[in-house]
Amino acid sequence: MNPRHHSLAEEKVFKDPVHKYIYVQDETIWNLINTREFQRLRRIRQLGTSYLTFHGAEHSRFSHSLGVYEITRKIISQFERGGYTDWPREERLVTLCAALLHDVGHGPFSHSIEQVFDTDHEEWTCRILLENTEINQVLRECDPSLPERVAAVICKTYNQPIVVSLISSQMDADRMDYLLRDAYYTGVNYGTFDLERILRVLRPYQGRIVVKESGMHAVEDYLMSRYQMYWQVYFHPVTRSSEIILRQIFRRARELYGGGYAFSWMIEPLRHLMEGTLDVENYLLLDEAMAQTAFTQWLKEEDSLLAELCTRFLNRKLYKYITMDNADEKLWQEIREQFQSIGLNPDYHLEIDFPYDMPYDVYRLGHDFMDKDERPPILLLGQDDRLSEISRKSDIIRSITGIHQGKYHLYYPEEPLLESAHLLSPHIRERFGLLL
Amino acid sequence: MNPRHHSLAEEKVFKDPVHKYIYVQDETIWNLINTREFQRLRRIRQLGTSYLTFHGAEHSRFSHSLGVYEITRKIISQFERGGYTDWPREERLVTLCAALLHDVGHGPFSHSIEQVFDTDHEEWTCRILLENTEINQVLRECDPSLPERVAAVICKTYNQPIVVSLISSQMDADRMDYLLRDAYYTGVNYGTFDLERILRVLRPYQGRIVVKESGMHAVEDYLMSRYQMYWQVYFHPVTRSSEIILRQIFRRARELYGGGYAFSWMIEPLRHLMEGTLDVENYLLLDEAMAQTAFTQWLKEEDSLLAELCTRFLNRKLYKYITMDNADEKLWQEIREQFQSIGLNPDYHLEIDFPYDMPYDVYRLGHDFMDKDERPPILLLGQDDRLSEISRKSDIIRSITGIHQGKYHLYYPEEPLLESAHLLSPHIRERFGLLL
Amino acid sequence: MNPRHHSLAEEKVFKDPVHKYIYVQDETIWNLINTREFQRLRRIRQLGTSYLTFHGAEHSRFSHSLGVYEITRKIISQFERGGYTDWPREERLVTLCAALLHDVGHGPFSHSIEQVFDTDHEEWTCRILLENTEINQVLRECDPSLPERVAAVICKTYNQPIVVSLISSQMDADRMDYLLRDAYYTGVNYGTFDLERILRVLRPYQGRIVVKESGMHAVEDYLMSRYQMYWQVYFHPVTRSSEIILRQIFRRARELYGGGYAFSWMIEPLRHLMEGTLDVENYLLLDEAMAQTAFTQWLKEEDSLLAELCTRFLNRKLYKYITMDNADEKLWQEIREQFQSIGLNPDYHLEIDFPYDMPYDVYRLGHDFMDKDERPPILLLGQDDRLSEISRKSDIIRSITGIHQGKYHLYYPEEPLLESAHLLSPHIRERFGLLL
Amino acid sequence: MNPRHHSLAEEKVFKDPVHKYIYVQDETIWNLINTREFQRLRRIRQLGTSYLTFHGAEHSRFSHSLGVYEITRKIISQFERGGYTDWPREERLVTLCAALLHDVGHGPFSHSIEQVFDTDHEEWTCRILLENTEINQVLRECDPSLPERVAAVICKTYNQPIVVSLISSQMDADRMDYLLRDAYYTGVNYGTFDLERILRVLRPYQGRIVVKESGMHAVEDYLMSRYQMYWQVYFHPVTRSSEIILRQIFRRARELYGGGYAFSWMIEPLRHLMEGTLDVENYLLLDEAMAQTAFTQWLKEEDSLLAELCTRFLNRKLYKYITMDNADEKLWQEIREQFQSIGLNPDYHLEIDFPYDMPYDVYRLGHDFMDKDERPPILLLGQDDRLSEISRKSDIIRSITGIHQGKYHLYYPEEPLLESAHLLSPHIRERFGLLL
């Protein structure tokens, strides 16, 4: 495979608010962007329900995927200009394809849907790469082994770990783009860090990407941005509340469907989702437009719980929350009972959320945030060519490594509690700030 | 009506990328934002199909409506601080409501749908204000006359012209927000101008909003931003192409529906749209999610033309275009015939577009861009308290007033032409840049 | 004293890159800006010699002083709008004057000159406020007690501690402006934080400025910006090197002067500086233009050491440095001796710098960075009206409180070492990275 | 000469607020930056006295020179990547040197000093390149012909016109940098345009730099930025006032010097300036620090006129101005006489300024703003490889080409007129807005 044969006669550009321009030089990349599977990402939001908290966060996975591609392109092009022999030049195209396509398997409101239906976007990504799709065809036309190779990079089984680490590590192109992009669209300025400087200090070194020691402060800044974005954007309690409602809509629909309930309105791909019989064809028809259309139709569904949840989601009548310092099973049980006593359904009207019952540090050795699997740590390359794990050099990173913060939040609908406050026991009323 | 009675105990804020923060101080404004009709604007994009040209332009009319409100709030608050007697203080709340709600009647992909179905978003806005809606209820609770007054401002029949001109004039809060916002989300930097300076030089004066003469250069800058945004964003030929496809989808669907065609998939609000029997209830269910879901379902519709158009729109296989300097009816007729001869349907596969067959100047006396009705000109207030129309003072504005630029574009599907190029006459081939 | 009597007929504005605009509404403020003592701040750089490291950092104390005034004005105006009774409204003007004038006593390259000549800019500020100056006259015209009151605020002896804390505390207007401004002019983006949000969460409370608890993350972000600015800008080793050279120029000149040396060129205010006989009149003539002119004249001074140091400073031939992990008196002594043996003067050609032998934490309870005196800690105001010191609530601040980082740097001229490397002992050569 | 031999082992970077980073890859460029003549540019402001109007505009010619170098480097590197045969690759280093050094001959407050003493910075630039300087030595060490070649580029006599046009044309690297940089430091946002896009559409073509036709709107935007910067920054009447005062200080000093006046304070390079006997050595000692030190010393000069002018400049007590629509010699003569009658010196206390009595269009065929010599027009390169002068294609540029705006301003000291208003004739009083 010789990527030079596939250069576009003229470079294409996309105007991008985060990177100014995104440059496409390879015909394969251009063709991938124009497939139906990639264009579908325009109908899947990058930040799920966050737009209900930060109204500007309406950007799609399409934008983000282009951004990850562009950062990867810049890193590789700097490696090539620098003439580093530790960078395997023949991996350029497979790396760019993996960067562009790494999110192509995301469904609508991914995190919520995956929890309820136990699907996995990475698995779908691989199926889209390998089964009968336009993407598969474009990749195969370039090189018959390309679909498998790109899938291997995304599944982290590729035989060149340096390629994997560009797409998936503590400082990969994915995170760098989403921090900057999410900060731009939400309008917060916590996520900004000096991308240009970080790109300048990355080096390919013995099968991994490392950071020149002089770039340590830039990495600190990047990790602090991440910390701020997690707490101020990704874990925002209003966003958590909307995710809970969304999850409950899917849970309720599946429950009803399983019980043979006759929906007043249904659509094919959703039916397959609930039956667990989705194939690639139907999976690709699932997008956020379809999910929202279903919610709109269910606003008047006979099942009042489903109708209520859809109303809450579409009209943004979210659950409120109270905060608790520690887990108190007894209290929770009592609350459940009192909720039941005033006609609420605690399985749906009460949700205890501890956003951090997952590996959650901003930076932790061998672990990482929101990932089921470990990601390699950040290594500094000293002037003496020795590698050091960054928290050994940086006091600030050592300090924040392993910080566990977080509290329990109880989410619940406020209106019925206000109405029935007089029926609750005094100390439960006090907990929920209710006055008679 | 005394708006002081309705002040929120604590100011609410929205984080906004364009204005940093949006401040809500009135209970009525807060309640309006939380109505289902206003929340629906989250499902209607501000720039219609522009996201197919500028992938960042995925922002909604919800964001823009908050922005117009915020600019209006700032202007009024400056008028109040300045103690200008020409500003009628009792109009504050009605003005803020009109600013917030001026776009509430927009449907999905408004410009396209209005052309095909001959609806009018301003009319729908008034119906939503006046009929049985949550918005109507919130307004009435504040003051029974408020729905009618707000509607009058939006329809430009209000008895206080100064209020109308804040919402709708050559330099209204609507335009100021959309130029800045569209520039931010597309990522172009043409739309930026010094909003803070413009706000500082606005003055209420004898029933209109005028500009202190010292602010002339800031207004020039604003008008030049407008000029650049029109030509580089709003009239971008790729966006025009996607609007054409979209219009044709709606046209084809209506044509089929009128002919009694049995759609494999249909949904209630769309049926009413095609029958011309929409009421407010169904209109509010129409949003871009629903339109896109319909297109997804029609991808395999039996009518191959509808299926093709939906494929083109969803997968972004847009029409190409060629440019012509002037109208040449004879040539167009010839092209139509040749298109027909190779099996194309010129009613759908050929569209001649002259984006400027409307009053179109960036700034024109007594007329305005994209408006069916005239908007008052920009007046400068001299130190001697005399008013001058701005193009009398500014050489640059005088120079650009009345510039007519624009060319005819012919949009068409490229693939069939490439396939049947050998069947076309040589000079038509040449026109379309086709080689044998 | 009723400041309303002194309102300007029309608000004045300054265009400012950091705050967009700076608004002046009081005649006294306007007149203070136009005094010769305040205009002199245009000839004193805000960041001393940092422009030799960051070429953009050429901004003056004039800009910064306006910025501190503007932030203070915004805070007070928000306190007044909020109607907080804990803010003493009658202190508005004295606070604004103190904000504007707090740096008026700075001399050229303050930190260096103060170390060599043992002067103190705060003392000079008070003398300029209280002695026969245009500033004193403007203040007295407004209110005879104003000079003393403003001086008391700046010296932190004022009887309203809340006023002092606006000008001088862990989160005062001074720091907020300099972090943003220095970041803007150097071009680094570490110093940016969300000023608008911080201003929104400040509250006057029982004689101090506190932060609403919901603003904790914004404060974390501000403290992290400070941390990054200290290490990446203020303590940059190249800047330290230029400060060392500068200090040595002053030391050498004073030494020569004390020894009766006949300078080929001298100027009155410098003579007074060296004699320790500066009065306000001569102090005000001292500025960076004069210091640089002296250095230009001394380029050919007969004393070769002084000439060399001036050449180094003006032509940016700075000292190099090597890093040491810990204090090793024996090694230092050896280096001194070897330097002497090759004709260097270790009193001038060798300087050991530990930038952190001062209270230096980014945030420390009861202490503060670069301050000889303690500053009050940051207090969070909970919803229950209880105050908590911020590091008790914020894990991240607790983590970084008390971090001690820093290494010893040895600064020296590189050229003579390269020339005489063969005369040095091998392990000293190795220390300095010299090859034969 | 083979520049590859001179590549630095490791790329050097400067942090720059406008371009983020400035990259140095050639040893010669690095060495030139470190010469004393180039370092001297740190003591010469880019915008002369503009900092008295826009307090942020304190940036130096050093910053700007690095910026021009960086833009030129980017253009050349894009030409090289694009493989355009019309770009003579062997001219890379000479072009970069010329870009870096084109302003090295500027003296303090150049425009003012050149008018009074009839010097020419371009001539001094060539002398600094060709005579006995560190710059000359660095260039010669690289290639003995380099000093002459670089000087030829700067004097526009070089035999490769394409090299000259990169440094000096309607859209050269010089202007592109100064518009962006001056906008950044003043804080106005008029000067911003999309540099990245403009760089992408530049092409070397038959001995000139042209613009791809698709970049026309970007060029329009650049020309509009220029227009705004001229009227809102460069021609700001307050800046003109400070330039007038400055010129008069120099005029008065020269007049006194010529008359044998005994200055209480003088310094060698200034003496040579007044005698017209400056050589390169003394010219290089002249900088703005020295000029300001002289003004400080002359504050108490026996000649009261010189003392007054210095006071005005240093303490920013500038002349006021009135505006006149057209030239009225008779009125001017009358004003002169009346000024004389109240003890003013009309040669110094009255200056009529028409900033536009120079070739002044923002864009004019064959002419250009603030240039004594013509600069080549901007040419668009069509898809058919034909060139068109841009105003033939762009309505907006055609509209503004040749706009002549501008009014006469009369500058004068306000204080004496206020004092002696009763001695002036009524219609002169009226002209100057004086009330009895």
Image: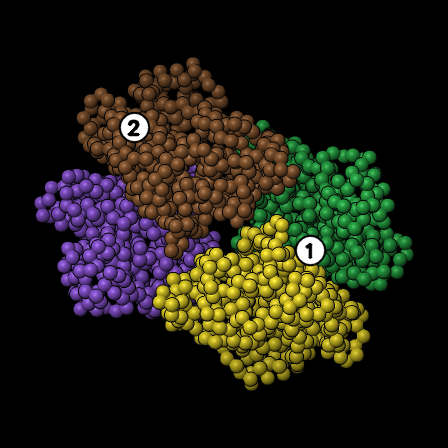
Chain colours: A green, B yellow, C brown, D purple
Identify the chain of the residue marked 2, using the numbered disc in the image.
Answer: C
Q: Is residue C17 left or right of residue C290?
A: right
Q: Residues within 10 Å of mark 2 (few under 14, many from 20)?
A: many
Seen in the picture, residue B376 relative to A431 is either above or below; the reply is below
Residue A223 in the image: x percent, y percent?
59, 38
| Residue visible at 35% across and 26% down in the picture | C115
Q: Quadrant of the C terminus of chain D?
A: bottom left
Q: CA distance from mark 2 to mark 1?
A: 65 Å
Residue lying at 38% horizontally and 68% vertically, measured from the top left? B385
Question: Residue at position x 80%, y 38% from top?
Answer: A332
What SS does tag 2 mark? helix
Q: Nearer the viewer, residue A289 or A3?
A: A289
What chain does badge 1 belong to?
A
Residue picked out by circle 2 = C250
Residue A368, image x, y percentages:
67, 37
Identify the residue at the far top of this view.
C330
Q: Position of residue B261 (x, y in %)?
A: 79, 77
- Identify residue for label 1: A44
- Classify B73 as above or below C119: below
- At label 2, the amino acid type is Phe
Q: Check if mark 2 and mark 1 are on a common chain.
A: no
Query: On the picture, is D70 further left or further right than D49?
Result: right
Dividing the picture into quadrants, the one containing residue D23 is top left
Report the side of D415 relative to C196 (left or right). Answer: left
Tell me if residue C184 can be seen. Answer: no
